[in-house]
């Protein structure tokens, strides 16, 4: 597939574009989709990723598939495979290829799952690794290879999302959300947070998001201290993690009475959560879809 200069590229392609410094130029590549989320009924079908080479140079790519989890620091960690890890059932073709400048390559996936798989979530990650084939040892410090990971989730049986925010705390460095996922499928936040120095209301939050999207100033919204996008790192089943948001500079004293608010998608539902942060730094638990 040849990519023309004026070709329309949908926004979900652009979200996966990476610019990484290489020996001679910037390697501009994109992967679509960013992740695959499959039900058990879908594994009999063939699925695909596409790697786009937007650069002016040909690239060589090697694929690697691995089992993974999230560590205590919310970083993806590759772990050893076992008989029930999804990477053991996944067939990828091709595993090694070249992509001409301005072109793309389709990578097809098939799944050979064993019979009677226990219900639950299974995960693997497909890594796209650039292969450097030149031989310039004196320039090694200037070379860098792209490595792009695309996650694949398979849900066997009914999805049972269940999560709770155990507490929201504020210190000199961070706003920290303690979140537990007791369900059988991963969850992630998709929305905005805001801090208020008075009791917030739905109208004020909607106005804040509207003005932000229209690049207008939010300083006129009464009671709004700060706001931002929620972290989007997935929280895996049966995991608890701390999500840290850097303390906004607009907070001048951590003992002031504040209210934390989240609006957006969480555990497959639209949520509007309001959690007080009091001067005693007490925990306030909010249960979601239990």
Image (cartoon, rainbow, N blue to C red):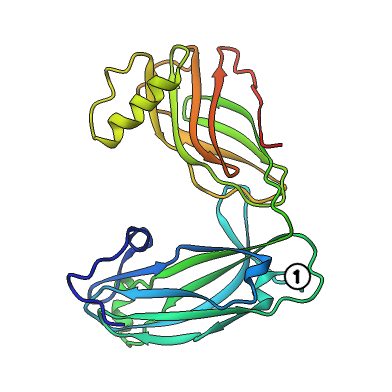
Foreground: 10 or 88? 10
Q: Is residue 271 above or below residue 98?
A: above
Foreground: 16 or 109? 109
State left or right for residue 225 relative to residue 235: left
On-image quarter of the C terminus: top right
Residue 204 visible in the picture: yes
Which quarter of the picture shows residue 116?
A: bottom right
Which quarter of the picture shows residue 157?
A: bottom right
Q: Residue at x 70, y 69 (%)?
A: 85
- Residue 3 % position (x, y): 25, 77
Q: Residue at x 43, y 18 (%)?
A: 196
Q: Is residue 107 above or below residue 261?
A: below
Which quarter of the picture shows residue 8?
A: bottom left
- Residue 262 % position (x, y): 50, 30
Q: Pointer 1: residues within 10 angstroms few (<14), some, or many (20+)?
A: some
Residue indicated by mark 1? 84
State left or right for residue 149 relative to residue 41: left
On-image quarter of the N terminus: bottom left
Element assignment for label 1: loop
- Residue 104 % position (x, y): 34, 79
Q: Residue at x 31, y 31 (%)?
A: 210
């Amino acid at each position: 597939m040849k990519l023309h200069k004026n070709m329309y590229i949908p926004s979900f392609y652009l979200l996966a574009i990476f610019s990484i410094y290489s020996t001679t130029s910037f390697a501009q590549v994109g992967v679509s989709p960013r992740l695959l989320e499959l039900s058990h009924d879908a594994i009999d079908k063939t699925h695909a990723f596409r790697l786009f080479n937007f650069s002016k140079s040909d690239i060589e790519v090697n694929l690697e598939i691995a089992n993974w989890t999230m560590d205590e620091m919310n970083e993806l960690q590759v772990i050893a495979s076992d008989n029930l890890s999804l990477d053991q059932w996944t067939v990828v073709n091709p595993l090694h290829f070249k992509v001409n400048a301005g072109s793309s390559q389709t990578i097809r996936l098939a799944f050979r799952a064993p019979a009677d798989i226990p219900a639950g979530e299974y995960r693997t990650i497909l890594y796209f690794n650039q292969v450097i084939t030149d031989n310039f040892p004196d320039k090694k410090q200037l070379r860098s290879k792209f490595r792009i990971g695309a996650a694949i989730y398979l849900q066997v049986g009914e999805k049972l999302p269940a999560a709770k925010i155990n507490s929201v705390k504020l210190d000199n460095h961070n706003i920290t959300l303690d979140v537990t996922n007791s369900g059988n499928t991963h969850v992630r936040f998709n929305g905005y947070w805001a801090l208020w120095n008075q009791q917030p209301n739905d109208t004020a939050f909607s106005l804040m998001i509207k003005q932000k999207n229209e690049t207008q100033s939010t300083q006129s919204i009464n009671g709004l201290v700060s706001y931002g996008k929620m972290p989007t790192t997935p929280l895996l089943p049966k995991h608890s993690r701390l999500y840290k948001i850097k303390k906004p500079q607009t907070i001048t004293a951590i003992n002031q009475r504040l209210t934390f608010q989240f609006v957006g998608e969480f555990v497959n539902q639209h949520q509007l959560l309001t959690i007080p942060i009091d001067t005693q730094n007490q925990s306030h638990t909010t249960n979601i879809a239990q």
